[in-house]
Every structure is written in C-alpha cells, then in structure tokens.
Image: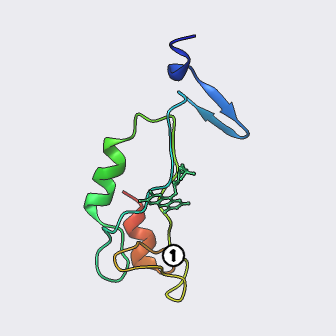
Amino acid sequence: MHDALFQPISLGAIQAPNRILMAPLTRGRSDPGAVPSAIMAEYYRQRAGAGLIISEAVGISIEGSGWAAAPGVWNDAQTDGWKP
Ligand SMILES: Cc1cc2nc3c(=O)[nH]c(=O)nc-3n(C[C@H](O)[C@H](O)[C@H](O)COP(=O)(O)O)c2cc1C
C-alpha cells in the first residue's frame, strides 16, 4: 500500500502515529559542561512529526563522554537542559 508509511504502528510498548522512524544521529551541540542547548531543542522540534525519534548518544558520566559538545545526563544542569 503506497500510503503505509503514514499509518500508525505498534512497536512493543511504543504506539507510533506513523512509520517514519529517526535513527540516533549524534550532534555536537551541547553547551559547555555537556548541557543540552536551545538549538538541540529546535533540532528535535523540527523533526517532531516523525513517528519515533531515537535521540543521539548521551553520556552518563564524564568518563563515558565520547567527544566535545556531546550532551550528558549525569548532573542536574544537564537533566534540566533536556526538559525543553
Ligand atoms: C553521523 C552519524 C551519527 C550517529 N550517531 C549515533 C548515535 O548517537 N547513537 C547511535 O546509536 N547510533 C548512531 N549512528 C548510527 C545510526 O543510527 C545508524 O547509522 C543508522 O541506524 C543506520 O544504520 P546503518 O548505518 O547500518 O545503515 C550515527 C550514524 C551517523 C552516520
């Protein structure tokens, strides 16, 4: 069916409104301290029509941080930065 891409799909516990799924694609856009930034929120907002977005890789510790400007999730400033 040519319009199947726009039909809902169940993926385990996930109910996606369409079948356009975004793979994780690393950005390098966090603020100093690995704090998620306003341009990251804009990036995901621009793609919010996808059925499912898998976010970029996120560091869980300074030791696990892979590269400059990758976002983290190991302190309060970072978790607050993800909320928008
Ligand atoms: C620039 C770039 C950044 C990527 N970043 C991530 C990432 O942050 N986390 C992850 O799990 N995969 C990441 N990937 C892997 C993609 O999700 C993967 O390439 C995609 O699922 C397509 O699979 P394929 O490479 O086997 O075609 C990245 C790929 C590219 C090209």
Q: Residue at x 31, y 51 (%)?
A: 43
Kindly identify the amino acid type of the residue bearing the numbered disc 1: Gly
Name the residue at the bottom extreme. 63
Relative to 20, is 42 on the left or the right? left
Q: Residue at x 53, y 89 (%)?
A: 63
Screen quadrant of the C terminus = bottom left
Q: Is residue 11 above or below residue 44?
A: above
In terms of image quadrants, where is residue 83?
Answer: bottom left
Tell me where residue 76 appears, x and y as whole percent.
45, 78
Tell me where residue 64 appears, x and y as whole percent.
54, 83
Relative depth, front residue between 77 and 5: 5
Residue assigned mark 1: 59
In terms of image quadrants, where is residue 68?
Answer: bottom left
Q: Residues within 10 Å of mark 1 (few under 14, many from 20)?
A: some
Name the residue at the right extreme. 12
Figure colour scheme: rainbow
Tell me where residue 75 appears, x and y as whole percent.
47, 81
